[in-house]
Amino acid sequence: NAGVTQTPKFQVLKTGQSMTLQCAQDMNHNSMYWYRQDPGMGLRLIYYSASEGTTDKGEVPNGYNVSRLNKREFSLRLESAAPSQTSVYFCASSYQSRTSGFNEQFFGPGTRLTVL
Amino acid sequence: AQSVTQPDIHITVSEGASLELRCNYSYGATPYLFWYVQSPGQGLQLLLKYFSGDTLVQGIKGFEAEFKRSQSSFNLRKPSVHWSDAAEYFCAVGPNTDKLIFGTGTRLQVFP
């Protein structure tokens, strides 16, 4: 099992450019998450998807869109990148159900994005 | 509002010394508590978790944590630190409508 994979690992954009960060998991998890990590801020949730076909905003959704393509894949799109979006982006997944309770999240290796 | 506080931004210890990283939470119901570790340039790895039962939980890499409801704390401990433990440590609490709330992290530096 590869766990949670993210592409690309590094990316440099110019202000106004667009790009999509890809995330896939092979653990049959139903929930997937996108976070950004900035120094001194910990991890902040951008969007999450509790199941295939559903997405919800997290703490910092402005400037981002997401797509839950299928159960395995959850992509994050920056339509018009801004320097404030320079960050490290992490995708995570977990299995949540009423019977199994609240379970831990598994994280990908991250994408380091710089917007000039 | 639910929150997690890690009061120590940066801790430095000598190799072989004991370690305690502090975590305080604010949560209305019975919390699910987690400690994650992040090595430089890596993603987050789960160290341990508390859902219910014994308030002293054992994790990987020789770490343990104790849940103290009266103090709203879930401190992480290790009796003898190794140089490879140098990393950033995050405490998290859930579920907040199926989401985790993370603390801002504590960076651990280990001197030989």
Image (cartoon, rainbow, N blue to C red):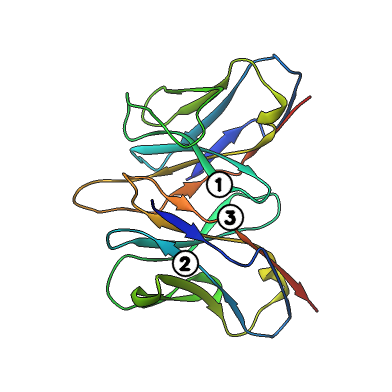
- The mark that comes first in sequence, 3 or 2, is 2
Relative image position of residue B43 (x, y in whole percent): 60, 49
User: Are the residues under marks 3 and 2 on the same chain?
Assistant: yes
Kind of residue at badge 3: Thr
Relative image position of residue B101 (x, y in whole percent): 45, 51
Q: Quadrant of residue A108?
A: top right
Q: Please indicate whether residue B100 sits to the left or right of residue A50 in the image.
A: right
Mark 3 belongs to chain: B
Q: Please indicate whether residue A50 sits to the left or right of residue A65 in the image.
A: left
Residue linked to disc 2: B24
Q: Residues within 10 Å of mark 1 (few under 14, many from 20)?
A: many
Residue linked to disc 1: A43
Kind of residue at badge 2: Asn
Find the distance from the CA under tag 1 to the CA under tag 2. 17 Å
Q: Residues within 10 Å of mark 3 (few under 14, many from 20)?
A: many
> What secondary structure is marked by label 3?
loop
Q: Residue at x 50, y 70 (%)?
A: B60
Kind of residue at badge 1: Leu
> What secondary structure is marked by label 1?
strand
Q: Are marks 1 and 3 in contact (CB under 8 Å)?
A: no
Q: Residue B104 has which mark?
A: 3
Relative image position of residue B39 (x, y in whole percent): 66, 57
Mark 2 belongs to chain: B
Q: Residue furthest front?
A: B1
Q: Please indicate whether residue A1 sits to the left or right of residue B105 in the image.
A: left
Q: Is residue B69 above or below residue B29?
A: below
Q: Residue furthest left?
A: A99
Relative image position of residue A79 (x, y in whole percent): 59, 15
Q: Nearer the viewer, residue B16 or A56?
A: A56
Mark 1 belongs to chain: A
Find the distance from the CA under tag 3 to the CA under tag 2. 12 Å
Q: Residue at x 73, y 18 (%)?
A: A15
